[in-house]
């Protein structure tokens, strides 16, 4: 009751003050009728405080999110359901849910009185432009009586979390190199099946018998292809995300790192849907096996939280990948690289792995003078060429490039084109 009295509004306190003034006046003047008025004025806020205080502990609240995992830039619906567990009706209630700044301002919803054991639902929407995990709640409920004489606030302790995942874009179907590795149960053999000849061939590897060369596939792909041995193969892929702070530029949702995270999510989901046994490795030390059921959700939840690291280099990232390198396909998304760092990545070519690297020119995410731009372009071209010489398929990425437009260049037969493009860019940069 004491807490309810502390919840008296300005109107309720005014009633009590008027009651005290009327009582004092009645005693001084000897007016019994005025004393009755004082009792009535005092009874109204006291009864309101009792009424609100009694109903304070008779409410139940549940919250649901639709969906619980929302992509960046999309909206999610929050549904609040309140139930009156008492036999007395409630007054008008003001609902206020606590939200982090990234989800917008706190929503305030007015809920009319609830009858005995009656329930009602209200909903509001939130939108996040930055990925992450955001707490929603606790819910604050302000209870008032019909006359507005008393107001109490109740906080429900339950908190739900909305996961804002990176934007996932659809990718075209292309034939990838290094899609077969290891043995195991039969799985989807490629991103796109082009026929029996393709399904029975793979890239030539050092030590393969030249009598197994399949000339028809070699002529079609532009690379030396050999017949596979008749055994069950499985598709394996490792997606590597570079999280070095100094390798990325830009701020907020448009930063180069956010492009890399979205591309990582898109590639991982694309490969999982194609039947690949997938592994995700990040520069923060995360090494996730997403091969089992629910692997897509695990990847997206992980990428929702991944951050840039001020410490760490590519040496640790290469060692982490090589701890469990079982061949197959390696796709890396790297920020700005030096020639030495690009050469260091040759360590991932072991065990017959085919490596595809998206070399992000993060300097294009920030404005530079003409001289600095030329120097940055030369450094990026030299690093791309070193990456190709290290045995990688290099895919240069600049600000404004869309991943679906770049994805076909990772297909078979593009190694020579990538090498010549990097060489031409380096030569033109030197001659300028």
Image (cartoon, rainbow, N blue to C red):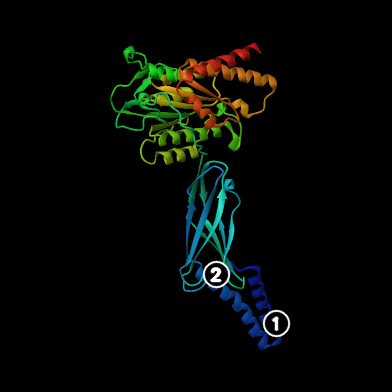
Q: Is residue 98 visible?
A: no
Report the side of 290 relative to 129 (left or right).
left
Q: Position of residue 349 (x, y in %)?
A: 41, 19
Above or below, 377 against 90 in this view is above
Return the residue at label 2. Answer: 113
**Residue drawn at (66%, 81%) of the image:** 23
Above or below, 411 against 160 in this view is above
**Residue drawn at (60%, 74%) of the image:** 45
Give the quadrant of residue 225: top left
Report the side of 119 relative to 229 (left or right).
right
Front-most of 361 and 21? 361
Task: Name the secondary structure under disc 1.
Answer: helix
Q: Position of residue 242 (x, y in %)?
A: 50, 28
The crowd level at tag 2 (other Cα within 10 Å; few <14, some 14-19, many 20+) is some
**Mark 2 or 1: the one toward you:** 2
Disc 2 + disc 1, Cβ < 8 Å: no
Tally of marks: 2
> Which disc, if any, is residue 38?
none
Report the side of 233 relative to 415 (left or right).
left
Front-most of 78 and 29? 78
Return the residue at label 1. Answer: 25
Task: Name the secondary structure under disc 2.
Answer: loop
Q: Position of residue 326 (x, y in %)?
A: 35, 25
The crowd level at tag 1 (other Cα within 10 Å; few <14, some 14-19, many 20+) is some
């Amino acid at each position: 009751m004491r807490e309810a009295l502390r919840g008296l509004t300005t109107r309720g306190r005014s009633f009590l003050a008027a009651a005290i003034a009327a009582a004092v006046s009645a005693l001084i003047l000897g007016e019994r009728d005025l004393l009755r008025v004082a009792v009535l004025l005092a009874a109204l806020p006291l009864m309101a405080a009792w009424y609100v205080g009694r109903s304070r502990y008779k409410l139940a609240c549940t919250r649901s999110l639709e969906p619980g995992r929302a992509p960046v830039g999309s909206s999610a619906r929050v549904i609040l359901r309140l139930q009156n567990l008492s036999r007395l009706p409630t007054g008008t209630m003001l609902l206020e849910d606590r939200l982090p700044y990234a989800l917008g301002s706190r929503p305030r919803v007015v809920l009319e009185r609830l009858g005995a054991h009656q329930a009602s639902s209200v909903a509001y929407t939130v939108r996040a432009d930055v990925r992450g995990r955001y707490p929603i709640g606790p819910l604050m409920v302000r209870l008032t009586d019909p006359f507005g004489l008393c107001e109490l606030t109740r906080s429900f302790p339950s908190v739900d979390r909305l996961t804002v995942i990176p934007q996932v874009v659809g990718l075209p179907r292309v034939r990838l190199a290094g899609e077969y590795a290891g043995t195991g149960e039969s799985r989807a053999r490629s991103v796109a099946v082009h026929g029996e000849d393709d399904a029975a061939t793979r890239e030539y590897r050092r030590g393969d018998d030249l009598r197994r060369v399949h000339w028809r596939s070699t002529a079609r792909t532009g690379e030396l292809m050999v017949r596979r041995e008749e055994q069950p193969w499985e598709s394996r892929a490792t997606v590597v995300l570079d999280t070095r702070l100094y390798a990325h530029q830009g701020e907020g949702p448009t930063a180069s790192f956010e492009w890399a995270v979205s591309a990582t999510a898109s590639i991982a989901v694309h490969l999982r849907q194609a039947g690949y046994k997938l592994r995700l490795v990040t520069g923060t030390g995360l090494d996730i096996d997403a091969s089992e059921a629910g692997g897509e959700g695990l990847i997206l939840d992980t990428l929702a939280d991944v951050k840039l690291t001020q410490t760490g280099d590519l040496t640790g990232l290469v060692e982490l990948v090589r701890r469990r390198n079982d061949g197959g396909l390696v796709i890396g998304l790297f920020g700005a690289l030096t020639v030495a760092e690009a050469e260091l990545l040759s360590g991932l070519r072991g065990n017959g792995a085919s490596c595809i690297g998206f070399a992000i020119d993060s300097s294009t995410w920030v404005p530079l003078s003409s001289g600095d731009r030329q120097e940055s372009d030369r450094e990026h071209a030299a690093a791309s060429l070193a990456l190709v010489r290290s045995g990688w398929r290099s895919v240069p990425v600049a600000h404004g490039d869309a991943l679906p437009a770049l994805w076909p260049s990772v297909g078979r037969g593009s190694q020579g084109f990538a090498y010549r493009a990097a060489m031409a860019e380096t030569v033109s940069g030197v001659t300028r």
